[in-house]
Amino acid sequence: MNPFDLTWGSLADWVAAVAAALGAGLSIAALRHALAANHTAEQTRLDAQRTAAATEARERARDATDRDRERRTLAGSVAAWWAADREEAGRRYVVVVSNQSPTSAVFSDVDVTVSGWRGATHLIHMNILPPGKFFVEQGMEAGQPRWKRIPLPVLPEDVLDPFTVASDRSIVQVEYTDGLGTRWRWTPRGGLTEVERVDAPVP
């Protein structure tokens, strides 16, 4: 058979078939490319979501750490120590309770356990501890220690030197509640620790 004897119709059919095959191949290639692009875009979206979630988690953790540090810094504003004035006769021995909060925070239910003369312990309780320094005096009556009941503010003329090496007078423990209802405890050995959160009573 002479190839030149092919009719134009049969040649056109062959050309159309080849074109269709090429078109199908291109379509398949384009589909594969589109699927790959979609997969890449989806992977990029998932990676972005994971990165955003990880960043948010780190920020939340950092914020929580900052809040805890601020809470502990605020709670650390409360302190207590033994002190005495400089009078030779009738010297006053006192316990100073201090609130040096930089935010003027007020603490409540303050309990200061002290050890004094002959190891006797005493509990100083304050319903409210506003900013400032206050002292409770330990006096003597009939040869026994007797404590003043009402804390008094430390005035500029009150020269009260803190005891730094006294072995017979010490602060055993300090407990108090901050403005958020968290109970704190300080001891010489344990330092500052969070005890519990005091929930407000339900009306």
Image: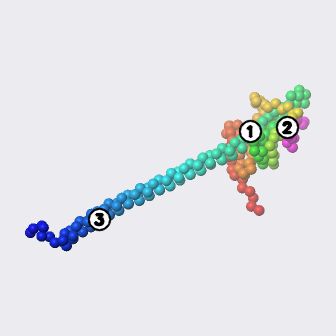
- The residue identified by callout 3 is 23
Q: Nearer the viewer, residue 24 or 193?
A: 24
Label 2: element kind: loop
Q: Residue at the far left: name it.
A: 1
Which quadrant holds residue 41? bottom left
Q: Is residue 126 visible?
A: yes
Q: Is residue 144 visible?
A: no
Residue at 20%, 68% (x, y): give it.
14
Label 3: element kind: helix
Which quadrant holds residue 132? top right
Compared across the picture, whether 82 is left or right of 73 comes to right
Label 1: element kind: strand
Query: Which disc is residue 172 wearing?
Result: 1
Residue 192 location, x and y as percent? 69, 41
Residue 77 higher or lower than 53, as above or below: above
Quadrant housing the N terminus: bottom left
Q: Earlier in the sequence, mark 2 or mark 3?
A: 3
Residue at 29%, 65% (x, y): give it.
24
Q: Earlier in the sequence, mark 1 or mark 2?
A: 2
Q: Marks 1 and 2, how far apart in space?
A: 22 Å
The residues colored magenta run 139-154
The amino acid type found where label 3 is placed reads: Gly
Residue at 90%, 36% (x, y): give it.
142
Q: Marks 2 and 3, how far apart in space?
A: 96 Å
Query: Which is in the foreground here, disc 2 or disc 3?
Result: 3
Which quadrant holds residue 79? top right
Query: Which disc is residue 154 wearing?
Result: 2
